[in-house]
Image: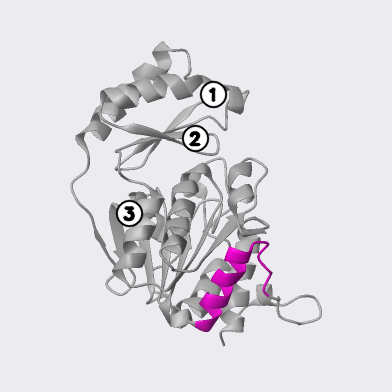
Amino acid sequence: MGSHTTDSTGRKDPLPTPVTQAGREGLAALLARPRRAVIGLDFDGTLAPIVADPDQARAHPDAVPALAALAPKVASVAVVTGRPAGVAVRNGGFAGVPGLEHLVVLGHYGAERWDAVTSTVSAPAPHPGVASVRAELPGFLDRIGAWHGTWIEEKGRAVAVHTRRAEDPQAAFEALRGPLADLAARHGLIVEPGRMVLELRPPGMDKGVALLEYAREIGAECVLYAGDDLGDLPAYAAVDKLRSDGVPGLLVCSGSSEVAELAERADLVVDGPAGVVRLLAALADQLS
């Protein structure tokens, strides 16, 4: 598997125990019926450490080996991200890896899909409001005095404004929420808040919709989802919905001091991307 699966004595990492009954039932179902299980994973902050420049985000070095060991033993691994699917594939290093034939990337909150078997991306036409906002946003930020310390990330089917480089990132984030919500609404878009980032994107696109539709499409009998940010809350809600329909699930939080909401909802909190990778590796070991 790789060095992350063992401790200093050479023993394999044990599987952690979820703190909730529903989580323990979800883990038990996954271990009992792995071939019917979907492993859903956010990318930034979950498989890849958060960095100041998202273009520089890369999957944890042990993520691909862990995924390649786990993916053949489950129905599917689905990376669910707001990024374009192709960017997540590139930054994750997922293309052409033996063992990842059961991996898909649901990019742009499910609007795009990359399949490891075909190495192709399928997607509908983009929302016209995104192009309008993209053109207006630089002047808009300048007019409201919010240009200094903020920057725009081009995401193809969405556009994001980051405040992490501002003198006071949280204050800049809060000051921009209202004005950006107004701008988005004028163009038929919504604003999705994240960790020092506000993303303007079409409505009806979220990780919950993507995860729920995919799980139902492949007939999943168990779903694990791991995320780290506010944008992952809809995916958590999707797992809750599946549970109410009789499909066991496990909610994992890639721990962060910036977002407490997920940790409070999670069945299991791990130590960031390194903890997520250890969990995936332990699952692969357990299913060997």
Q: Is residue 91 visible?
A: no
| Amino acid residing under circle 3 | Gly
Find disc 3 in the rendering and name its residue. Answer: 110
For the C terminus, which image quadrant?
bottom right
Secondary structure at badge 1 equals: helix
For this rendering, which residue is in front, 245 or 51? 245
Q: Would you call the spot at circle 1 few (<14 residues within 10 Å), some (14-19), or many (20 or more)?
A: some
Classify 10 Å Cα crowding around label 3: few (below 14), some (14-19), many (20 and above).
Answer: many
Q: Position of residue 283 (x, y in %)?
A: 59, 76
Query: Quick check: is 30 in the magenta stretch?
Result: yes
Asked whether 9 falls inside the magenta stretch, the response is no
Q: In the rendered structure, are the residues bearing label 3 and label 1 in contact, judged by CB atoms less than 8 Å apart?
A: no
Residue 207 visible from this viewpoint: yes
What residue is shown with label 2?
Answer: 197
Magenta segment main secondary structure: helix
The answer to whether the residues at label 2 and label 3 have Cβ atoms under 8 Å apart is no
Q: Look at the picture and state if 235 lies above or below 130.
A: below
Residue at the spot 56% in from the left edge and 84% down from the top edge: 287
Residue 86: quadrant of the picture: bottom left
Foreground residue among 147 and 261: 261
Determine crowd level at label 2: few under 14, some 14-19, many 20+ residues with C-alpha closer than 10 A: many
Which segment did they paint magenta? 15-32
Please identify, in this view, whether the residue under mark 2 or under mark 3 is nearer the observer. Answer: 3
The secondary element bearing badge 3 is classed as: helix
Instruction: State the residue position of label 1.
Output: 174
Q: Earlier in the sequence, mark 1 or mark 2?
A: 1
Q: What residue lies at 30% left-to-right and 30% top-to-bottom?
A: 134
- In the picture, the quarter occupied by the N terminus is bottom right
Choose the circle earlier in sequence order: 2 or 3. Answer: 3
